[in-house]
Image (tube, helix red, strand yellow):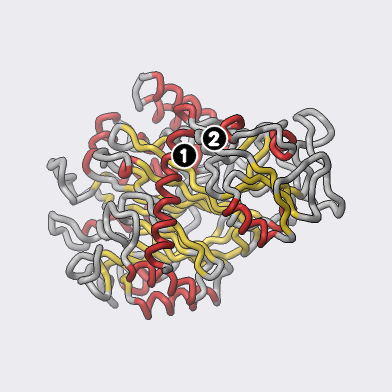
Amino acid sequence: MTRQTPRDDLNDDAATRSLDAAGADPAAHAARERLAGALRRKVGRRGFVTGAGAVGAGAVAAGLRLLTSTGGATSAPTPRPTATGAASASPTPPAIGGVVGQATPPVPAGMALVTSSRLPLFGVGADDPDRLLAGKVSDWQEVGTAISMPVEPLALANQVPAGTHPVATFPDYEALVAGLAKHPGGVALIPLSAVDFRVNVLSVAGHDPLRDQDGPSSQVFSVGVVGDIVPGRNVNDKMVAYGDYTHPFLKIAHILSSFDLMFANLEGDLSNTLQPPSDPHTFTFVSSPKMLDGFKLAGIDAVSLANNHSTWNEAGWGTQGLLDTIGALENAGIPYFGAGRNLDKARAPWSPRAKGATLAIIGIDGVTANEDDTRPGTLAGSVAAGADSAGTNPFLTQQFLADITAATQQADIVIPYFHFGVEYIAVLPQWAVDGARAAIDAGATMVVTNHPHVIQGMEIYKGKPIVYSVGNFIFDQMFSVNVREGMILELTFDGKRLVGLRGHGVEIEDFNQPRLMTAGELASLMDRFWDATDRLIEEKLT
């Protein structure tokens, strides 16, 4: 896919001046330099992303694969050379090896180096595939993981690379996926055409075989999802103190803007008429619409308003904050979903297009607009939109199932983005799990959720992923490790098919500003993610 069209909605000099307002400390200076470099290599998506409200959405910056992250982080894809198209797999077992600059690539075209999804590593060097598959690397720490795990070469029975000695072979891809569960340190070279989201595809020497499939016939595109962006309290105070409403996004904008589509949960109000409370412990979250400059800088294409702080607040504003927020988003050209001026608007999905595929993203409020407000994790009363009144899209099971089914008739990919769960609890109540699974039964491609302010786990239900809570993203909660951390969910689609699912960890600093995690931090985060996954399987599936 071509990524060289200049952006027309962000001036380089203005953006650089905005970064200069962030302070003079070395870390901030380094972040500004990286982001300024990304903006100088800016690209546009307006010819790529279309759909309801897409005009005015932020453009893709080249940063994720052109910049390294702050703080020595290693959890994002590594810098890459010019991408090459993926060819069909060779009918004979390919040899491996080669380094950058040689005619033989590190991984043959049409092949992918895969591991268990539980391995917290996304890329290796040019000479590592040969060493890994040939048994010359005994532990994954030698190639960049923060945890010690023995390397176990694996292979498909009819695709054993020459010069390798796998500890186990498997008759087909399904058997290999099952085998990786028993061999968590396993690694195999398999045809790229066989890959789906259940394995982790390693980039090699900066080349990501999943996302780097360029060419006029490529149907590959990426979607990024983050959790709670809460504009009030210390987040607002920090933006005011720095004199920069883009400040929370500075260390992460190059990551978010690398996705072809990007959406988030905006959990609070943006208003020129409502004054932010002075109480540092308030649950009324409000800031200036100027914060949307940061959303644009980060390339956030749309936001969900289906949450318990779009309308509910301690100040008793009713729907004024929501209506002000809707107006601010419309003025900024940023689409929203999951709430609206009436129920029809609240139920309507965000429907962008990417590489010929139509998506439908549906926001559903299961906390302050639940059909049963006695359920764990719900609040009494309802802020649901009505036929002629503003509010959120309610968690009414038959209604949202009908909306999902209807969306499958219009869209190729349908993703409900639920707001539910119990705050600070890693495993969901049964009613929430049942709702997510019902969405899959109704035809959803996958499900993503948020609300608890901590990451949860995931399950594969009837062959489709449900990712429970991607955690906080921009918030001032600093009282525990769990609430200071969140995840950027990276989804890669090839047409209608989900072929990649990765979680890039973020650490929130200074009460407002996320950065990409280091390898050690990512390993700790993903350990909790998989622990929650195992608990979910044990508690909900037995």
Who is closer to the viewer here, 88 or 134? 134
Q: Sequence-wise, which precedes: disc 1 or disc 2?
A: 2
Residue drawn at 45 percent across, 36 percent down = 516
Could you tell me the amino acid type at mark 2?
Thr
Task: Please give the label number shown on residue 92.
Answer: none
Query: In which quadrant of the rendered view does residue 28 lie?
Result: top left
Residue 78: image x %, image y %? 60, 35
Task: Please give the label number shown on residue 523.
Answer: 1
Query: In which quadrant of the rendered view does residue 506 lie?
Result: top left
Who is closer to the viewer here, 162 or 247? 162
Residue 14: image x %, image y %? 44, 31
Who is closer to the viewer here, 85 or 520? 520
The answer to whether residue 300 is above or below residue 97 is below
Residue 128: image x %, image y %? 69, 33
Residue drawn at 32 percent across, 56 percent down = 451
Q: Mark 2 and mark 1 in contact (Cβ < 8 Å)?
A: yes
Task: Please give the label number shown on residue 145.
Answer: 2
Residue drawn at 43 percent across, 36 percent down = 521
Quadrant of the snapshot with the C terminus: bottom left
Tell me if I can see residue 354 in this picture.
yes
Residue at the front extreme, as displayed: 167
Relative to residue 388, is residue 10 drawn left or right?
A: right
Residue 304: image x %, image y %? 38, 58
Mark 2: few, some, or many residues within 10 Å (few <14, many ≥20)?
many
Tell me if I can see residue 214 in this picture.
no
Relative to residue 26, is residue 221 drawn left or right?
A: right
The answer to whether residue 344 is above or below residue 131 is below
Relative to residue 519, is residue 345 drawn left or right?
A: left
